[in-house]
Image: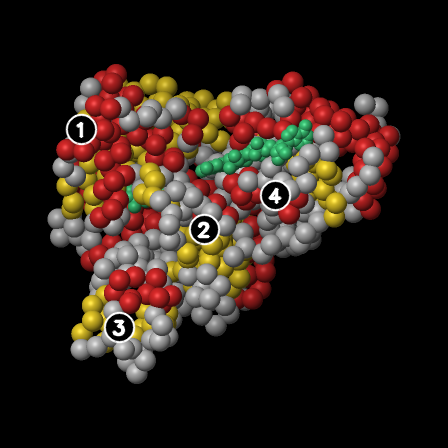
Amino acid sequence: MSIRVIKEKCSGCKLCLKSCPFGIITIDNKLAIIGEGCNLCGACVTTCKFNALVMAKEQPAIKDYSGYRNIWVFAEQRNGKVEGVAYELLGEGRKLADILRVPLCAVLMGDKMAEPAKELIAHGADKVYVYDDPLLTNFQDDSYGEVFIKLIAEEKPEIILIGATSIGRSLAPKIAYRIRTGLTADCTSLEVDPRTRNLLQTRPAFGGNIMATIICPNYRPQIATVRHKVMKKASRNASHEGEVIRKNFDFSKINIKTKVINIVAELAKTINIAEADIIVSGGRGMGGAENFKLLEELAQVLGGAVGSSRAAVDAGWMPYSHQVGQTGRTVCPKLYIACGISGAIQHLVGMQSSDVIVAINKDPQAPIFKVATFGLEGDVLQLVPALTRQFNKVLGGDY
Amino acid sequence: MNIVVCIKQVPGTTDVKISEKTNTLIREGVESIINPFDMYAIEEALKIKEKMSGKVIILCMGPPPAKEAIKEAIAMGADEGILLSDRAFAGSDTWATAYTLSMGIRKIGAYDLILCGKQAIDGDTAQVGPGVAEALGLPFVAYVRKIEEIREGYIRCDRMMEEGYEVIAMPLPALITVVKEINEPRLPSLKGMLRAKKAEVATWTAKDLSAEPANLGLTGSPTQVMKIFSPPQRPGGEMILGEIDEQVEKLVNRIRELKIV
Ligand SMILES: Cc1cc2nc3c(=O)[nH]c(=O)nc-3n(C[C@H](O)[C@H](O)[C@H](O)COP(=O)(O)OP(=O)(O)OC[C@H]3O[C@@H](n4cnc5c(N)ncnc54)[C@H](O)[C@@H]3O)c2cc1C
Ligand SMILES: Nc1ncnc2c1ncn2[C@@H]1O[C@H](COP(=O)(O)O)[C@@H](O)[C@H]1O
């Protein structure tokens, strides 16, 4: 893209010159000239009274990428089990592979991976590259990264999808930097242009206030990390056929500098909120730590997890691992019940793609009601226990 | 121990809107701040320095006004700051940003540890930290919530994971990116503010860095923004009215109709 000056319309009025935050516009002979270093902020385009400045899309440079084919999915595993996000990537990858008419491949690293490899094939992978090595039991940036980088150099995929988990978002930038290609973080929607084979990667920015569609037209492979719980999981079909390609990596040739000393699970008892289908979440309106008990009871009846706003975390009522929002987790459950949460944008961006949102708040003007599927005006301390009782009654629980 | 902290200057709010007329970002009247996650990186660097002596150097790439961010960090206690600023850097994506910062760090030369925030609140990518580490060939750990031990040539820290944390050790020099849990950033002291006022912040250009022009700014960025738009609004919902018993009964029925439970 670039900003173009339409000669016929420019009067040389200098308004744009004043509007440019970088001070790179000059006027020469009554004509605006955009200097080096324009970052396309568009301030001049907005200011021009004569419509003489336009954002112009450039023709993509034609490079030959016909040697780069196939869609890859990183099959992240933890404790020997493939993560849910990998199956979502297979579901999405299948769509892209069908449009581009190429095979869908999975890359799997770990120890004793024969069974997981079969599972990936049952979920639609046409090929699975498997590295079975005790050194790959647990994720490590340097070992996983080097294996991945070498395989990319050998096989030249055109698109690589990686889950936007703490592992994926650490691994992907290492790979993308080394092979000098583009990486788009935390995508929530993907499309592909069959003509240019460009991946159109849409993601939230500015804490979810703005969506941006990013392309990487002049480099291959195109790499995206994809947010958990927004794409549909591939369905399982035991008769789907695929090929397992066993690979080896010679670790004696690289210097692994990081060492995992210990892995500590913290959320063993509670349900991980990023995975939960139902979340009962509380904010400052709960009034105190002791009242979160009410939310736990409701969550228990529904088989869900307890979430929290930042205000409740800052007050010390809930641990940070339960915080939903811009600086906490992004969640996408089937049902999100917000109790005593006002609905600040930083909270909304973390939960507004939930299927159904219920808001309970005593202030009818609270912004949370704008995104809520169902709104209940009233006191959480009365409504939450009543809701627990009612669910318990109709679900026939023994609570 | 010499520590480099990479900080970014960002708009003080993420509550930005798109002009319907021009389809560009409306950014007037928004004050700039140090990216909140980078405040934790600064604080952690200062704490390490207090324990082990050495220097804390602030590195920031941005337009000239970003000097203010560096001065704020100096007011908190950082020793010196360097601004990477050149029109050639404008329009950088995470690849080009990581490249440019890594060239700045190469020029600084003597460093043991590089600290970055987990992510910047404007782009939310979390890619620059690991990218810088890769550009310098350094080991790194992202999402660090605690440094358990640090000494000459060695660091052991906790990486935050979805289900808990991992304890990871690596040799120095190395890079870590930090999350909010790691500390509580201090406020600038009066003495610090006076020092910051007088402090000289060096500005390095592309030439000073001996940077490869093809790797800089818009030209050096593999990704391009094709379009920006406002997220689709959720359709307004239904208020369920009545006495408490009525409200909950209606709500539970609705949710059952939707077959969620
Ligand atoms: C950079 C940045 C990042 C942020 N990240 C996050 C984030 O990740 N997650 C997050 O949640 N926030 C985040 N915030 C904070 C966010 O802006 C809000 O301050 C926060 O979400 C407010 O929490 P709350 O809704 O619980 O509290 P409040 O805004 O105080 O709302 C409490 C609500 O409870 C209602 N209420 C009170 N008593 C009762 C009662 N008895 N019955 C029913 N209703 C009652 C009130 O009407 C009110 O609407 C961030 C802010 C910034 C600047
Ligand atoms: N322009 C910049 N100048 C200095 N540091 C930066 C810059 N951009 C990003 N960083 C660092 O990289 C981290 C991650 O940024 P991002 O990948 O943009 O989310 C930030 O928290 C900063 O520590």
Q: Is residue A6 left or right of residue B227?
A: left
**Mark 2 or mark 1, which is nearer the start of the sequence?**
2
Q: Earlier in the sequence, mark 3 or mark 4?
A: 3
Would you place residue A392 above or below residue B31 in this image? above
Dot in front, 2 or 3:
3
- Residue B16's tag is 2
Query: Closer to the camera, A80 or A47?
Result: A47
Label disc, if present, on residue A367 of the rendered structure: 4
Ligand 1's quadrant: top right
Question: In this orientation, does residue B50 appear?
Answer: yes
> Mark 2: which amino acid?
Val
Q: Quadrant of the C terminus of chain A?
A: top right
Q: Which image quarter: residue A3?
A: bottom left
| Residue labelled 4 has its Cβ within 8 Å of some atom of ligand 1 | no
Mark 1 lies on a secondary structure that is helix
Calculate the distance from the C-alpha at mark 4 to the C-alpha at mark 1.
44 Å
